[in-house]
Amino acid sequence: MAVNYKELGLVNTREMLQKAMAGGYAVPAYNFNNLEQIQAIINGCGRTGSPVILQVSKGAREYADPILLRNLGKGAVEMACSQGYKIPIALHLDHGDSYEVCEACIENGFSSVMIDGSHHPYEENVELTRKVVNFAHHHDVTVEGELGILAGIEDDVSAAQSLYTRPDDVEDFVRRTGVDSLAISIGTSHGAFKFKPEQCTKNEQGVFVPPPLRFDILAEIEKRIPGFPIVLHGASSVLQKYIDIINSNGGKLEAAVGIPEGQLRQAASSAVCKINVDSDGRLVMTAMIRKIFSENPKEFDPRKYLGPAREELMKMIMDKNRNVFGSAGRY
Ligand code: G3H
Ligand code: 13P
Ligand code: ZN
């Protein structure tokens, strides 16, 4: 049975992204796969008064079941309401790779979808994206398209090298597809290993410092489509604190490098209105769980390790909203 997101109390991303554009901040888009992650996201965003986009990848749909995920989204809205949080909440498909998966999500209560045609030739990307937009807009669901390729792994698709978005393409793409927002490639990538050590310099603390994002390309894109919401994927900072906890408790994540927070702050104050974070959440939870298991090898109650992991994730989300994305208090 088809369900419209409005019946669930969700909103699409149109108004939140317009407000972010006008206010010079970015709306956080956090990926979730399970109960503890969605609790941390809603409580973190609720406590900071930040609008939020709950993101579900194709992998998450397979892991957690689409019907259950939709009901977690519905439950998230009700829980937010019962806690007195007034924040708008969108439920978004991340990296939809076909018309069919977008259609299924729209009919299953999602308020926003991404159709990622960036791996197709340009004209095919336009065609596919336009087809999704036609169906989505009929249901007042917003659509994110993508131009340019990020390095790293997105579900089954992996790219060894990034291909920056060509500013020459963006105006044509936005006009012909009717998309509501556009994901671009300016040097970010998915996962915890965004840059090879040889691409980085080392600071005094021995921490890898990556090359800066291509803000020149972003500025050129902004000139071509003024006032149009831009999305940044692959924007985890890979916080050293959690890498250290993981590595000192049996993990092996040497040479993990992310996007420095200062660069994300800069992006958030530009036309970048939505910033995607998945890996940072995974790292926080892994760090806390590893620490608890090393400190207390007798622990076997999932609440005793997932609970602290959830608490730390919420703190990280609050910090990002306040100090990186500037989205706190913007509901
Ligand atoms: O963009 C990719 C997201 O981090 C989703 O990752 O496909 O492992 O769920 P996943
Ligand atoms: P990270 O891997 O940097 O968290 O990026 C997540 C993302 O872009 C989800 O679409
Ligand atoms: Zn992504």
Image: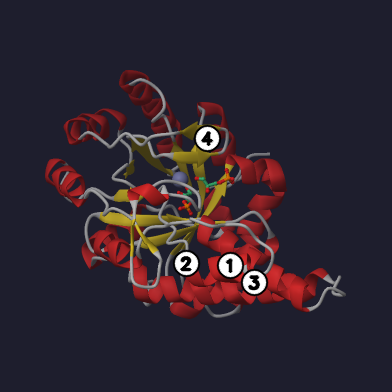
N-terminal of the pair, mark 3 or mark 1, is 1
Q: Is residue 69 left or right of residue 149?
A: right
Q: Quadrant of residue 73?
A: bottom right
Distance from disc 1 to disc 2, alpha carbons, whole Å, reads 9 Å
**SS of the residue at dot 2?**
loop
| 205 vs 106: above or below | below
Q: Is tag 4's residue or tag 2's residue first in the polypeptide sequence?
A: 4
Query: Which residue lies under the disc numbered 4?
Result: 102
Q: CA distance from mark 3 to mark 1?
A: 9 Å
The tag on residue 284 is 1
Kind of residue indicated by mark 3: Arg
In this rendered view, identify the residue nearer to me: 229 or 191: 191
Name the residue located 26 percent from the left edge and 30 percent from the top edge.
Answer: 173
- Would you say the residues marked 4 and 3 are in contact, meaning their CB atoms lie under 8 Å apart? no
Residue that carries the numbered disc 3 in the rendered image? 310
Which numbered disc, 4 or 3, marks the residue that appears first in the sequence?
Answer: 4
Tag 2: amino acid: Leu
Q: Position of residue 245 (x, y in %)?
A: 60, 71
Q: Residue at x 38, y 71 (%)?
A: 331
117 or 101, nearer to the observer: 117
Name the element at disc 3.
helix
**Callout 3: 10 Å neighbours few (<14), some, many (20+)?**
many
Find the distance from the CA under tag 1 to the CA under tag 4.
30 Å
Side of 166 relative to 309 (left or right): left
Asked if the residue at tag 2 contacts the one at tag 1, i.e. Cβ–Cβ closer than 8 Å, the answer is yes
Q: How far, Cα to Cα, is label 2 from label 3?
A: 17 Å
Which three-letter amino acid code belongs to the residue tagged 4? Cys
Q: Which amino acid type is marked by label 1?
A: Val
**Visible in this render: residue 39?**
no
Residue behind mark 2: 239
